[in-house]
Image (tube, rainbow, N blue to C red):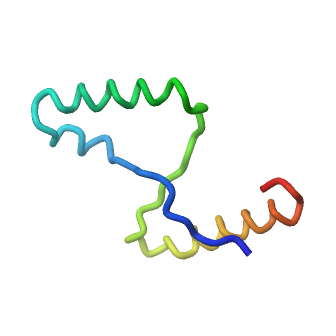
């Protein structure tokens, strides 16, 4: 059975404007450099405070279990 892991760092783009002057551009440069070594994956994010978060979490875990059963995990 799949387990829920905390394996991603997510930053809301609107919060980047709260960074001190110069830090936003330095942060963007770091992300760009990291991106050279990481495949271009796409992700969906759900705030864990949302009332539907547990449903989304269970759908993901069920999908991971399905992948494992079919040898795709």
Q: Which residue is depicted at the point 63% across and 73% down?
A: 58
Q: Nearer the viewer, residue 11 or 14?
A: 11
5 left or right of 60 in image: left
Question: Which quadrant of the view contains residue 41?
Answer: top right
Q: Which residue is depicted at the point 26% across and 42% down?
A: 14
Q: Could you say where residue 26 lies in the image, as x and y percent from the top left?
A: 24, 27
Q: Could you say where residue 69 lies in the image, as x and y percent from the top left?
A: 87, 66
Q: Nearer the viewer, residue 54 or 39?
A: 39
Question: Which quadrant of the view contains residue 38?
Answer: top right
Viewport quadrant of the C terminus: bottom right
Q: Residue furthest left?
A: 21
Q: Could you say where residue 59 lies in the image, as x and y percent from the top left?
A: 66, 68
12 left or right of 53 in image: left
Count of numbered labels shown in the rendering: 0
Q: Could you say where residue 50 lies in the image, as x and y percent from the top left?
A: 41, 70
Q: Which residue is depicted at the point 10% across and 30% down?
A: 21
> In the displayed structure, would residue 57 be above or below residue 46?
below
Question: Which quadrant of the view contains residue 19?
Answer: top left
19 left or right of 56 in image: left
Q: Which residue is depicted at the point 18% across and 32% down?
A: 23
Viewport quadrant of the N terminus: bottom right
> In the displayed structure, would residue 15 be above or below residue 48?
above
């Amino acid at each position: 059975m799949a387990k829920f892991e905390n394996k991603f760092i997510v930053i809301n783009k609107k919060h980047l404007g709260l960074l001190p002057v110069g830090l936003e551009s330095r942060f963007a440069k770091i992300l760009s450099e990291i991106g050279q070594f990481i495949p271009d994956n796409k992700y969906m994010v759900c705030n864990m405070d949302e009332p539907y978060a547990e449903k989304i979490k269970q759908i993901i875990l069920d999908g991971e279990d399905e992948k494992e059963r079919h040898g795709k995990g």
